[in-house]
């Protein structure tokens, strides 16, 4: 199985969490909220085959971003995965909207000539996130836990970006509607651990199996094929 978006650095015992996933051969991409968090974790992760750590500037930590820019530049070549990054124009994040846009532009400028994969936070800012990706010529990105409009979803699909699906999405009518509009070849899976209770990728596979009318093995093969196609350009 594949988990392209989780926060294993927030586990009570991160090394046990990632060791268990390594034993199960679960490809796991751990997000960080700040480059200083990546700095603390990268040396612990390097020895694993199935575990990777992403370099992040989470939009809800925007007030801390400027002092982290230097570390982002310092570590950007240490991983092929960038996340969690993006924009949040919800009530929770709206007060730092201008800082977020500046920071996201900084991230995109840092990686636009490199083969990186972005995991994107885009709550209430899906259209703006997409526009910035296109403007900067970004090709490899995953919209994590998409919750925007279907019209913007179609624009994202037309741009060839991926979507990561989690257990919470298959529990809501809106989430199910969104999933039904995503082409099979653009679907990946995530847990968003620890923010979702009972975040079981197997449940997502079961749901997709029923939705698409194919077996669980075929779902697993399809998700793996999608992930391999996504990472084809990266080297680390």
Image: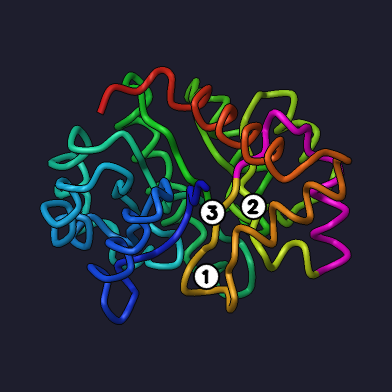
Q: Position of residue 138 (x, y in %)?
A: 49, 25
Badge 3 marks a residue whose secondary structure is strand
Q: Position of residue 130 (x, y in %)?
A: 62, 36
C-beta proximity under 8 Å, tags 3 and 1: no
C-beta proximity under 8 Å, tags 2 and 1: no
Q: Is residue 42 left or right of residue 150?
A: left
Q: Is residue 229 magenta?
A: no
Q: Is residue 232 left or right of residue 77?
A: right
Q: Which mark is residue 114?
A: none
Q: Is residue 157 above or below residue 195?
A: above
Residue 91 in view (yes/no): yes
Mark 2 packing: few (<14 Cα in 10 Å), some, or many (20+)?
some
Instruction: Report the span colored magenta.
Output: 172-188
Comparing 118 with 110, the one in front is: 118
Displayed quadrant of residue 221: top right
Provide the residue designation for mark 3: 121
Provide the residue designation for mark 1: 95
Comparing 143 with 27, the one in front is: 27
Q: CA gap, disc 3 to disc 2? A: 9 Å
Q: Is residue 148 left or right of residue 224?
A: right
Mark 1 packing: few (<14 Cα in 10 Å), some, or many (20+)?
some
Q: Position of residue 54 (x, y in %)?
A: 32, 48
Q: Chief secondary structure of the magenta span?
A: helix
Residue positioned 37% across, 30% down in the render: 116
Badge 1 marks a residue whose secondary structure is helix
Residue positioned 85% across, 40% down in the render: 212
Q: Which mark is residue 125?
A: 2
**Which one is in front in this view, the residue at disc 3 or the one at disc 1?**
3
Residue positioned 69% across, 52% down in the render: 205
């Amino acid at each position: 199985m594949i988990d392209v978006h989780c926060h294993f650095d927030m586990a009570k015992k991160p090394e046990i969490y990632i060791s268990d996933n390594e034993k199960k051969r679960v490809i796991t991409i751990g997000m960080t909220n700040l480059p200083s968090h990546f700095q603390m974790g990268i040396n612990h992760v390097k020895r694993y085959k199935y575990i990777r750590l992403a370099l992040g500037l989470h939009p809800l930590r925007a007030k801390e971003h400027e002092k982290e820019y230097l570390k982002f530049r310092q570590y950007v070549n240490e991983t092929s995965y960038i996340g969690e990054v993006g924009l949040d124009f919800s009530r929770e994040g709206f007060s730092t909207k201008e800082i977020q846009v500046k920071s996201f532009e900084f991230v995109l400028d840092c990686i636009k000539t490199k083969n990186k994969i972005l995991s994107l936070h885009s709550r209430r800012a899906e259209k703006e996130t997409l526009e910035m990706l296109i403007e900067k010529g970004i090709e490899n990105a995953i919209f994590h836990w998409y919750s925007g409009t279907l019209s913007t979803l179609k624009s994202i699909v037309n741009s060839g970006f991926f979507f990561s699906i989690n257990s919470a999405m298959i529990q809501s009518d809106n989430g199910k509607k969104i999933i039904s509009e995503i082409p099979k070849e653009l679907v990946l899976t995530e847990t968003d651990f620890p923010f979702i209770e009972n975040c079981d990728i197997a449940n997502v596979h079961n749901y997709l199996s029923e939705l698409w009318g194919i077996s669980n093995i075929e779902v697993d093969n399809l998700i793996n094929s999608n992930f391999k196609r996504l990472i084809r350009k990266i080297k680390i």
